[in-house]
Amino acid sequence: MDPVFMGQVLVRLLPPLGLTMLVSLTALAIATPLGLALGALRAELSDKHPASRIIDAWVFFVRGTPILIQIFAIYFLLPKLGLQPPLFVMGVGALVLNSAGYQIEIGRAAVQSVPRGQWEAAAALGFDRHATLREFILPQAARRMVGPVMNELSQLIKASSVLSVITLFELHKAAEAISSANLRFSEVIVVEGFLYFVFIFGISLIASALERRLSAAGALAGAGSFAR
Amino acid sequence: MSFDWAAFFEYLPRLIAAAGVTLQVSLLSLALACLLAPILALAWLLGPAPLRVIVRAFIELIRGLPPLVVIAFCYFALPKLGVVLSGFWCGVLALGVVGAVYAAEIIRSAIESLGKGQFEAALALGFARWRAVLEILLPQALRRILPPLTNEFANLIKASSLLSVISVHEISQVGQSLIFETFVVIEILVQMAVLYLIIIGSVTLLSRRLERGLGA
């Protein structure tokens, strides 16, 4: 272990860390409204509705295949359709495809977890379904989504490392390039791991603090898992 | 874009063989995870203070790393420490450890969710702490552990796709190299996706049935 070398690696890994954060945050910014809205919609529609079938197929595909396959699908299929967007766009696209698929379930669970009595009470007060959803159900559901959505950010940071396979120079790809150029693997991996850990652990601390604050409101706990 | 069935059936046998490797590596790492997870969970719950700190730090560390980094560590850094493993066993080790950490969390929270009363009652009846956990709490917690654990198995299968970067010949690696070899893209992508959907789908189905069957 050579501290001087590790210091140099740390400095060189900061811009790729920025790209990791940028790609994850951009994907979250798109996937969260998309996923949660589709999830709330799915909670409202019957199972037989055509839109339900499309949403269900999306969730089935995303949860039933590794994110690597979803990244390959974007990377290999878009050029077949005559589209050649920059790698960053493909990376964001793959993460959105994946994350929205998981957040659909979050949105749906949050809406369905609001007690039935709330709907009935609003109906008794003369609100129609649409107004009930907007004024009463969604605000309550939103509080329950905060924990899982924060959790989603750390999932996205972890998942973004897989974008290294399509040579997007995010943190993992950059670390791989530095370690094979210098043939010093352990030191680079330790620095890389340190950077990932600081951010992911930091976010999980914030997420659990938020969850505790909102737990009185029946927040759903974010379920962490390690693979997408 | 037309679908070439001849190419589809030409490459299918190779991908099915690769699915065998995916299953092998996932099952072996599941076995390792099931072995390590209870040890980690019990060390966290019952161990002496310094051991608890170490175990917690280890669990938080692994949870804070992308699995790809753990895999790269096992493959590139462990040999420097004198542990040389083939890609396959390296993958089993990396996925087994990552899986164990998440499974340990499941076991710990299931045991803690039973409440202190059970534990105190067992102690009052003269059970030793470890016997109270093993014989009273764990059997009850098992109902809450099994469904999420099968879910973690599905995650292990998904994570096994990452072993393509250390050239384990599982579905993703074989599919990816076939695509670059033959430029047959759609047919091979469909095969990869369908094979994963079949494997992961059946595990998910099992998980749902367990959830209903155990009423957890």
Image (spheres, rainbow, N blue to C red):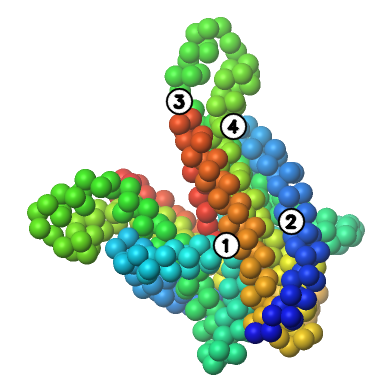
| Residue type at numbered disc 1 | Gly
Give the percent coordinates (x, y) of residue B126: 10, 58
Residue A24 rendering spot, x and y as whole percentages = 72, 54
Amino acid type at mark 4: Ala
- For the image, the number of numbered tags is 4
Vertical order, A174 against B117 (above or below)? below
Q: Can you identify the residue that label 1 sits on?
A: B64
Single out the mark in the foreground, 4 or 2.
Answer: 2
Q: CA distance from mark 4 to mark 1?
A: 26 Å
Q: Which residue is mark 3?
A: A115
Q: Quadrant of residue A185?
A: bottom right
Q: Disc 4 vs disc 2: Cβ atoms closer than 8 Å? A: no
Q: Is residue B8 left or right of residue B144?
A: right
Q: Residue visible at 61% across and 51% down?
A: A203
Q: Is residue A131 visible?
A: yes
How crowded is the residue under tag 2: few (<14 C-alpha within 10 Å), some, or many (20+)? some
Q: Position of residue B189 (x, y in %)?
A: 70, 66
Q: Are marks 3 and 4 in contact (CB under 8 Å)?
A: no
Name the residue that disc number 4 marks.
A142
Q: Which residue is mark 2?
A: A21
Q: CA distance from mark 2 to mark 1?
A: 15 Å
Which label is found at residue B31? none
- Determine whether B116 is above or below A37 in the image: below
Mark 2–mark 3 distance (CA, rounded to whole Å): 37 Å
In the image, which is nearer the foreground, mark 2 or mark 3? Answer: 2
Disc 4 crowd rating (10 Å Cα; few below 14, some 14-19, many 20+) is: some
